[in-house]
Image (cartoon, rainbow, N blue to C red):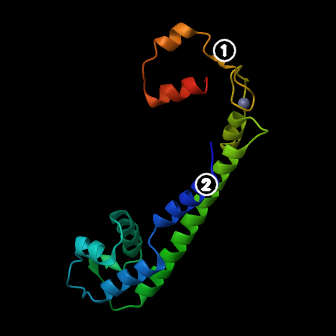
Amino acid sequence: MFSEEESVLQSSLITREFPSFQQLNEISKYLRLKTNQERINELALINETGITEIMWRFIRFHLEEQGVIVDLKYCPGNDRLNEAFQHISEKITTRIKSKQTKLTLFQEWLREKEYCRRELVLKHFGESISEKNDHCCDICGVELEGYFATENSYKEYRFHSWQTELKSIFHI
Ligand SMILES: [Zn+2]
């Protein structure tokens, strides 16, 4: 169900979602070359700095928030660019940390051998199980025989909405 190799991969995927320090530097350099008359060519910027469109949107959002970019034009004439990039750097660090914490929690849940998986999920959302189901989870024990007891309903299986499917998987 879970391998350590995948764990490293998942971690690196989280980091790769965000621009690296070097990429932030590239963008900063790119913007410094612009005057406030010139509209930023987003496509060129993305191509030249090698960031993804999603990364750029994230950076642009914060640069606009800090007033460094207005109407897609770089507003020089103050030292806010360094501050803004410092701010973005901190945001990225926080976001990566928060995602890694969530990933760790999820991995712990996968490794869990003692506590009911359903209870742990509910606990995460500040809730508890009101009624224990006969076929709860792999830790509480699911008897396949009993699980497929209603053979007919199994045969008639049709895919419903994902909400309905989830409900039926967790018997809620
Ligand atoms: Zn359980």
Above or below, 77 relative to 9? below
Which residue is label 2 attached to? 103
Quadrant assignment for the C terminus = top right
Quadrant assignment for the N terminus = top right
Residue at image position (42%, 86%) is 80
Which element type, helix, strand or loop, lies under badge 2?
A: helix
Give the image location of residue 107, x and y in percent: 65, 50
The image quadrant where one finds ligand 1 is top right
Above or below, 100 relative to 20? above
Q: Is residue 39 left or right of residue 149?
A: left
Q: How far apart are marks 2 and 1 (CA)?
A: 33 Å
Residue type at the position of mark 1: Glu
Above or below, 83 relative to 71? below
Front in this rendered view, residue 86 or 138 = 138
Give the image location of residue 94, x and y in percent: 57, 68
Residue type at the position of mark 2: Leu
Which element type, helix, strand or loop, lies under badge 1?
A: helix
Whether residues under marks 2 and 1 lie with C-beta atoms below 8 angstroms apart, the answer is no
From this viewpoint, is residue 151 visible?
yes
Nearer-N-terminus badge (2/1): 2
Which residue is label 1 attached to? 145
From this viewpoint, is residue 127 visible?
no
